[in-house]
Image (cartoon, rainbow, N blue to C red):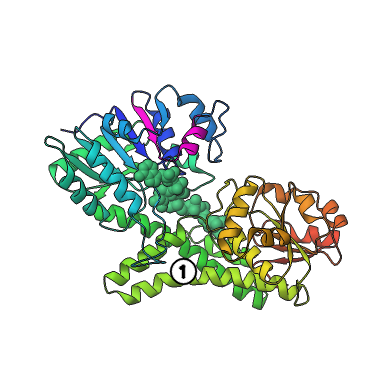
Amino acid sequence: APVKVTKICCIGAGYVGGPTCAVIALKCPHITVTIVDLNKARIDAWNSPDFSLPIYEPGLVDVVRQARGRNLFFSTDVDKGIEEADLIFVSVNTPTKKSGVGAGFAADLNYVELATRRIATVARSSKIVVEKSTVPCRTAESMRTILEANSKPNCRFDILSNPEFLAEGTAISDLLSPDRVLIGSLQSPEGIDACESLKEVYANWVPQERILTVGLWSSELSKLAANAMLAQRISSVNALSAICEATGANIDEVANAIGYDSRIGPKFLRASVGFGGSCFQKDILNLVYLSESLHLPEVAAYWRQVVEMNEYQKRRFSKRVVDTLFNTITGKRIAVLGFAFKADTGDTRESAAITLIKDFQSEKAFVNVYDPQVESEQIWMDLQEASPLMPLETIKKQVSICSSALEACKNAEAVVIATEWKEFKDIDWEAVYAGMNKPAFVFDGRLLVDAERLRKIGFRVTTIGRPS
Ligand code: NAD
Ligand code: UGA
C-alpha cells in the first residue's frame, strides 16, 4: 500500500528545491519539510531573520514567512534530513560537463550521484527517492543501481521521476497552479504505490486531472522535450525576426498573426536578443548528446540547430549595434540595461547580456551596466568567467556598474535593452536623452519600449525584428 508521507527532505536549496519545497510546506501543514544543502551561506540566507533569501522570486518571501519554523526548515545537516525523511527530493544542479567524455554537451551527473550515494550510506529505513533535477533519460536506472548496491538490510528504495516545470520570475504562481505535475514510476506494484504516495502530496492543492502519472523514462524525457520545444519556438521566432529586419515585415505583427492559430497559440513567441537561463541550452545539448549516443545523428543535428540559431541571434544583435554606430564603437560608451536572463529574477546564468557585453568589450567600447536585481559581485564573476584570460582590473577599466538606468545612460552614445524589466519602459526617457551624446541611439533587444515615442524625443531606435 502507498506510504503516507509525513516527512520530506529536499537535497539542494537552489532555484528549484527552495521554492518547490517551500510551496509544498505551505500547502501541506501536516508534512514536515526540511531543505538541506552543503552550501552554508545559502542555508544561512534562507534562515535569515529579515528574510533576505538567497534568490529573488516574486511572492517567495510571503510563502517562506508563513511556513518557516512551522513545518519548513533549512539546514546544512544533510544526513539528518535524509535519515528522518520518508520521501527525498534530489534537486541538485546538473550543469553541462566542462571536461571529459561528452564535454560541452552531456549533463554532469556528479552532484546527483553524490547525493544518491549519501542517501544509500545514511538511510536506515525505506525511502522514496524523487528525481527533481533535470536529468538524461534513464538516470533513474543508475540511481537505483547505486542505491540497491549500497543499501542496508530492510531498506527499500523506490525511485520516482518528478521533473519541475516552473519558470523563474513566476515560480510561485507556477507552483501554486501548475499546468501539470508529472510523476514517472516503474510500472511494478511498488513503483505504482510510490507514485500514489507522491501524488497524494500534490493532491493537497493540485486538481487530480492535472497530475499525470507515466513511466519513468517517459517522465525523464518529457522534461527535456518540453524545454527543447519551448526553446525551439523562440529560435523559430528569432529566425523570422532576421527575415523581418531584411524585408520590412514586423516580427510583432507576424507573431501576433500566427499566434491566433489555436494550434500554435499566442504564448512564448516574443523575439529577443536570444534566450538565456540555466536550462534551455543545457537541456537541449543534453538531448543532442543523448541522440548521438543512440546513433541518431539527424535527430541530434535537428536539436543542435536550436542552440546555434540562438548564438546567431546574439551575434547578429551585437553586429547590428556596431553597424548602426557607423561601424565602430571603439572608445564609445554603451549603456546596457539589464543583466539578468529575463525580468523578475536576479539569475544571470547564460544571460544574453553577458555575450553582448563581451562583444562590446572586444570592440573596445566602454560599457555601463545596470540591473535592478543583480548584485555587482555577480556581474563581475560572470564577466570574469566569460573572459578567463583577462585580469579583472582590465575588465573594470572597460565596464562600470551603475545604480540606476539614468546613471548608466549618462554620456553614453547608445542604450541597449538586454532584459525586459518593466522599469525600463517607464524611465524618464526625456532625461535619458538629455544626458546622452548625440545622435543618441536605443537598441531594443526585447521589444519593450514604444519606439515611436522615443523617436519623437529624438532617439534613433533600432528594434529586434523591424527594419532600421
Ligand atoms: P541550483 O544550482 O540553484 O541549486 C542546486 C543546489 O544543490 C546548490 O545550492 C548546491 O549547493 C546543492 N547541492 C549540490 N550537490 C549537493 C549535495 N550532494 N548535497 C547537498 N546539496 C547539494 O540549481 P537549480 O537551478 O535549483 O536547478 C536544480 C535542478 O533543477 C537542475 O537539474 C535544473 O536543470 C533543474 N531545473 C531548474 C529550473 C530553474 O528554473 N532553475 C527549472 C526546472 C528544473
Ligand atoms: C524555462 C521553462 O519555461 C520552464 O518551464 C522550465 O522549468 C525551466 O526553463 C527549466 O527547466 O529551467 P526559465 O528558463 O526560468 O524557464 O524562463 P523562461 O521564461 O522559459 O525564459 C527562458 C529564456 O527565454 C529567457 O531568456 C527569456 O527572456 C527567453 N524568452 C522567453 C524569449 O526570448 N521569448 C519568449 O517568448 C519567451
Q: Which residue is mark 1?
A: 306
Which residue appears farthest toward the top when viewing the image? Answer: 70
**Is label 1's Cβ within 8 Å of ligand 2?**
no
Q: Position of 405 compared to 245: left or right?
A: right
Query: What secondary structure is found at the residue carrying circle 1?
Result: helix
Residue 310 in the magenta stretch? The answer is: no
Residue 413 visible from this viewpoint: yes
Does residue 309 lie above or below 445 as drawn? below
Residue 212, horizontal then vertical, whole percent: 30, 46
Q: Is residue 251 placed above or below 77 in the rendered structure? A: below
Image: magenta residue range: 31-47
Q: Residue at x 55, y 30 (%)?
A: 51
Quadrant of residue 315 within the rendered picture? bottom right
At 62% from the left edge and 48% from the top edge, which residue is drawn? Answer: 377
The quarter of the picture where the N terminus appears is: top left
Dividing the picture into quadrants, the one containing residue 85 is top left
Does residue 149 appear left or right of residue 257 in this picture? left
Work out whether residue 75 or residue 341 is closer to the camera in this orientation and state it.
Answer: 75
Indicate yes or no whether the magenta region holds residue 36: yes
Q: Measured from the top left, where is residue 124 in percent x and y?
A: 19, 32
Q: Amino acid at mark 1?
A: Val
Q: Give above or below for 18 relative to 245.
A: above
Residue 252, how many percent across, how many down?
Answer: 62, 63
Q: Is residue 321 left or right of residue 45?
A: right
Q: Is residue 195 visible?
A: no
**Front in this rendered view, residue 459 or 129:** 129
Few, some or many C-alpha atoms within 10 Å of disc 1 (few <14, some 14-19, many ≥20)? Answer: many
